[in-house]
Image (tube, helix red, strand yellow):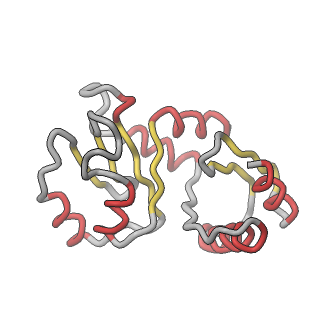
């Protein structure tokens, strides 16, 4: 993560911070989200190596994701996962996906995130970030409640 911080700082981003080893970056910029996404992707690809999909969210948007959590108070929040995306998936793809039964897990998709309740071990059931990317034809990244909450806290 130090290499990522350094690469982004050297390319002109301000107040670059990272949190844990999962690619969470906080920074200040005046770029629009599309330009930011493309530029960060290029910095990572050219300076570090991997060609990654970049998801851009503001602290306010992350707060909305937390507040719209449909499962809060119903289940153990440590078993709730949030898949974040840049572009809202096509309604038809969402509807087709939501017709499926993911028991004992649950899935709900809004314009801000896909919310997954995964009661067992992550990766043993069908619900996963990769599954959503494939079915919805999107780039997404998954985080848990604690990570989103910490990113909001760090951004203030």
The mark total stands at 0
Q: Residue placed at 59% from the left, 38% from the top?
A: 152
Instruction: Compare residues 113 and 78 and report the one nearer the observer.
Output: 78
Q: Residue placed at 12% from the left, 59% from the top?
A: 99
Q: How far from the left and from the top, in percent, is residue 24?
A: 62, 48
72 with respect to 43 (left or right):
left
Q: In this view, does 153 lie above or below 103?
A: above
Instruction: Compare residues 90 and 25 and report the one nearer the observer.
Output: 25
Q: Is residue 71 above or below residue 90?
A: above
Instruction: Compare residues 2 and 37 and report the one nearer the observer.
Output: 2
| Quarter holding residue 19 | top right
Q: In this view, does 20 lie above or below 87?
A: above
Q: Is residue 31 visible?
A: no
Q: Residue placed at 55% from the left, 67% from the top?
A: 53
Q: In this view, does 23 lie above or below 85?
A: above
Q: How far from the left and from the top, in percent, is residue 138?
A: 40, 69
| Quarter holding residue 37 | bottom right
32 with respect to 80 (left or right):
right
124 with respect to 17 (left or right):
left
Q: Is residue 56 visible?
A: yes
Q: How far from the left and from the top, in percent, is residue 55?
A: 54, 61
Which residue is at the far front? 124
Q: How far from the left and from the top, in percent, is residue 141?
A: 48, 55
47 with respect to 88 (left or right):
right
Q: In which quarter of the image is the C terminus?
A: top right
Q: Residue placed at 45% from the left, 35% from the top?
A: 145
């Amino acid at each position: 993560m130090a290499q990522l911080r350094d690469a982004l700082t050297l390319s002109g981003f301000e107040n670059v911070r990272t949190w844990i080893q999962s690619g969470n970056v906080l920074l200040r910029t005046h770029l629009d989200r599309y330009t930011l996404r493309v530029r960060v992707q290029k910095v990572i690809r050219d300076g570090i190596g991997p060609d990654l999909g970049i998801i851009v969210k503001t602290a306010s948007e992350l707060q909305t994701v937390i507040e719209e959590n449909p499962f809060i108070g119903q289940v153990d929040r440590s078993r709730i996962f949030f898949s974040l995306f840049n572009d809202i998936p096509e309604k038809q793809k969402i509807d087709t996906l939501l017709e499926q039964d993911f028991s004992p897990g649950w899935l709900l998709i809004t314009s801000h995130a896909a919310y997954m309740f995964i009661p067992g071990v992550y990766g043993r059931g069908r619900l996963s970030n990769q599954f959503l990317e494939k079915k919805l034809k999107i780039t997404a990244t998954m985080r848990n409640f604690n990570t989103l909450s910490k990113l909001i806290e760090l951004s203030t």
